[in-house]
Image: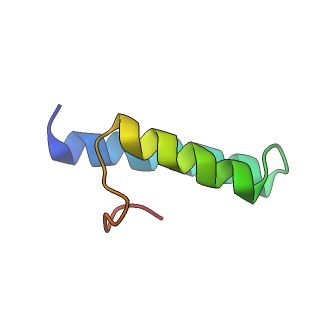
Amino acid sequence: MSKELAVIHYQTAISIFKTWVSRGIISEEELLTIDTIIAQKYGLSFDSIYRR
């Protein structure tokens, strides 16, 4: 998978989870955990400019 495609997949997934936070389905803390897992899945580093 190209880096560009990985970023698109990461941002798409995170946008869904952000919607869940706004609806009260998950908490901000859970979103942070999910963000780390999704970033690792798509090969984004902790300090990537594409992470939230």
- The residue depicted at 37 percent of the width and 59 percent of the height is 46
- The residue depicted at 31 percent of the width and 55 percent of the height is 45
Task: Say which quarter of the image contains residue 50.
Answer: bottom left
Tag count in the figure? 0
Specify whether 28 is left or right of 50.
right
Specify whether 35 is left or right of 24.
left
Specify whether 14 is left or right of 42.
right
User: Which residue is outermost to the top?
Assistant: 1
Residue 16 is situated, as x and y percent measured from the top left of the image, at 59, 44
Residue 18 is situated, as x and y percent measured from the top left of the image, at 64, 53
- The residue depicted at 82 percent of the width and 51 percent of the height is 23
Please state which of residues 35 and 5 is positioned toward the viewer in this rendering.
35
User: Which residue is outermost to the right?
Assistant: 24
Q: Quadrant of the N terminus?
A: top left
Specify whether 48 is left or right of 35.
left
The colour scheme used to paint the residues is rainbow
Residue 35 is situated, as x and y percent measured from the top left of the image, at 53, 49
- The residue depicted at 31 percent of the width and 68 percent of the height is 49
User: Which residue is outermost to the left?
Assistant: 2
